[in-house]
Image (cartoon, helix red, strand yellow):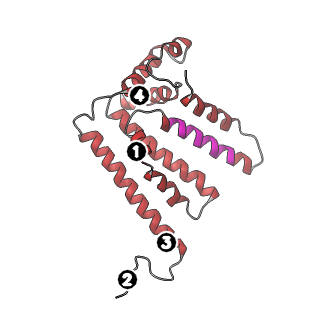
Amino acid sequence: MAERQIIPPGSGEPARLALLGYSLLAIALCGLLAQLGILLLHPKGKVLCGDEMAFLANTRLLQQHGLTREFLINMKGQAFGPLLNIVHYCASPLTGLKAPQVRIFHLALMVVFLLLIYTLLRKRRPDNAFSSALAFSAIPMLWNQSGGVWSHLPTMIAALVAIILLFGALDRAERNLAAGLLFALGEIGRAHV
């Protein structure tokens, strides 16, 4: 008995890549929906834990003092720079700096991260940029990072935007100050204070 093939013979590589891309998209969407469900329905979903409390306390300190020396020297409980606090300060009208809203915001940051990976790959590998970008959603650490208030996603997003701008500048043989500034912002996000 012959094996059934999902992709008809002779359909070629583009059809296989499209099927792979849509399969990965379905898996990523299921993962996002599952994590969203856990954040909304789990009994402890509305309770901040571990480092999240310190991160958001520092964001409240940023609201109180602004991006000043006073804020920087009084940050407590986080060993890295203020990028996460700046990002959450900007998002605070939507999140109220409360769980689960801040965690849902990080899920949105993960979607932004995947879109930026796609944007970067689209110019370099247009034939499989979609499936390659979605393959990043299979990295378990990303789900952990996107489900909590952690500093890695804002840092990776700043670095990816910098790389995209840098590649664009290289394609046009020009300099790009914004790329340098975003690399610096990404570094501030992980630098020890």
Q: Quadrant of the N terminus?
A: bottom left
Mark 1 vs mark 3: which is more N-terminal? 3
Q: Of tags 1 and 2, which is closer to the observer?
A: 2
Residue 133 location, x and y as percent? Answer: 51, 54
CA gap between label 1 and label 3 equals: 27 Å
CA gap between label 1 and label 2 equals: 36 Å
Give the left or right position of residue 11, taking residue 50 as reference. Answer: right
Amino acid type shown at disc 3 = Arg
Front in this rendered view, residue 148 or 88: 148
CA gap between label 2 and label 3 equals: 17 Å
Taking the view exactly as shown, the residue that stands out farthest to the right is 173
Q: Of tags 4 and 3, which is closer to the observer?
A: 3
Q: Magenta-highlighted stretch: main secondary structure? A: helix
Q: Of tags 2 and 3, which is closer to the observer?
A: 2
CA gap between label 1 and label 4 equals: 22 Å
Amino acid type shown at disc 1 = Trp
Mark 4 vs mark 2: which is more N-terminal? 2
* Residue beneath the point at 32% across and 28% down: 48
Amino acid type shown at disc 4 = Ser
Give the left or right position of residue 177, taking residue 23 as reference. Answer: right
Residue 43 location, x and y as percent? Answer: 21, 36
In the displayed structure, would residue 65 be above or below residue 103? above
Q: Which residue in the structure is indicated by mark 4?
A: 92
Q: Which residue in the structure is indicated by mark 1?
A: 143
